Image (cartoon, grey):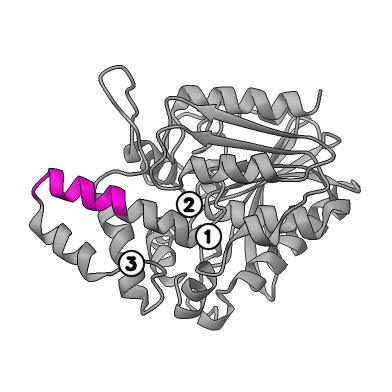
Amino acid sequence: MGILWAKKDFKLTSSGVSEVVKTRIGGIDQYLLIQTENVNSPVLLMLHGGPGFPVPGVSNRSRDFAMVTTTKKLVKHYTLVFWDQRGAGKTFSHLVPAETYNLSQFIQDAKEVIHYLKSRFNQSRIHLAGHSWGSIIGLRLAQEIPDELQSYIGFSQIINWVENDRLCLQWTLQKARSLHHAKAVAALEACGEPPFVTSVKQWSTLRMWMARFNSMIYTDEQVKHPGMKLVMSILLRSPDYSIRDIINTFRGFQHSYTQSLIEEFAQIDFAVTIPRVDIPVIFIHGREDVHVYGDIVEEFYRKLDAPQGKKFIWKDKSSHMFHPEDAEANEQTLICILE
């Protein structure tokens, strides 16, 4: 039970489904949230960011805002599935071996989730969306198993990890210098240039200072974003998250990053490895995102061979975390896919 239980943002009718499922995925117990007004609706699986940051995830039951999209209209059109991935939220466990935190295992886990959903809802294909880290898994799946997917939507899509880190380092150093933050400047300069593969500590230094300088949220005199308190409210008000689950969310975020995983990050360059996708693809990106740079995605999009159709959408009020108004527009985009 959430420690600050609040009124639900929406309720499903008696014919609908609102269920947290524990199922065996990748040799461990993993948790899914399934919400729909009609179990015969097309399935949409959303892959959260991180690794280890489960929003949207199981904690989002009956909550409208879910980091990248709102959901109360979405559940009337889709069987909407959120998943707490390996090491995240309710799925977190100290018993999971550290060596299983690798990209191949996360992709295999996702394939098993997809097979579970196809079987349970008797559908040959499902729709797939990924945010940030989840977009790495998602785009790989779009390439590897197109026959099992209807479409792919990449929110804050990651394309080239090392190039993105280079731009993030430039932004963070500029921010630190403009604030005369000598400690941040010294720490960032000590990291050198990407790829950051010397150690997890070196890799984490940039992320730590980006977070302190609020890289994930855009706000100005006209654009007001509720910020991280909105994400915290999702965790704290969840009917399905215990205090232990909330604590595990933060433990998992630290636990998920291993030396082997950050070395894999440095190899990601989808402009080289994924020249073609054989299902419809949409990329949706915050124009103010300084966490994952949209220009890299737009260049990838222009060159991508997508014979089933492709689209790129900028969201002017958003950085890495989508503004609630942009999230509503994203929801409508997802609904329009079915039309």
Residue 25 against residue 240 in the figure, above or below: below
Say which amino acid is labelled 1: Lys
- x, y percent for residue 121: 86, 46
Kind of element beneath mark 3:
loop
Can you give x and y, in whole percent of width and height, for residue 226 in the image? Answer: 33, 30
Q: Nearer the viewer, residue 207 or 56?
A: 207
Residue at 57% x, 66% y: name it: 86
Q: Residues within 10 Å of mark 1 (few under 14, many from 20)?
A: many
Is residue 220 found inside the magenta-colored segment of the image?
Answer: no
Asked whether residue 30 is in view, the answer is: yes
Figure check: 38 above or below 251: above
Q: Amino acid at mark 3?
A: Glu
Q: Position of residue 73 (x, y in %)?
A: 65, 24
Disc 2 residue type (three-letter) = Tyr
Say if 73 sits above or below 141 in the image: above
Evaluate whether residue 13 shows in this view.
Answer: no
Residue at point 42% right, 63% down? Answer: 253
**Height in image: 272 above or below 290?**
below
Q: Badge 2 local density, few (<14 within 10 Å), some, or many (20+)?
A: many
Q: Which mark is residue 193?
A: 3
Which residue is rendered at x = 62% and y = 27% of the image? 331
Task: Mark 2 vs mark 3: give the one in front.
Answer: 3
Q: Nearer the viewer, mark 1 or mark 3?
A: 3
The majority secondary structure of the magenta stretch comes to: helix
CA distance separating discs 1 and 2: 7 Å
- The C terminus lies in which quarter of the figure? top right
User: Seen in the image, is 66 located left or right of residue 274?
Assistant: left
User: Residue 272: percent from the left, percent from the top?
Assistant: 66, 60
Q: Are marks 1 and 2 in contact (CB under 8 Å)?
A: yes
The magenta stretch spans which residues?
170-180
- Residue highlighted by disc 1: 90
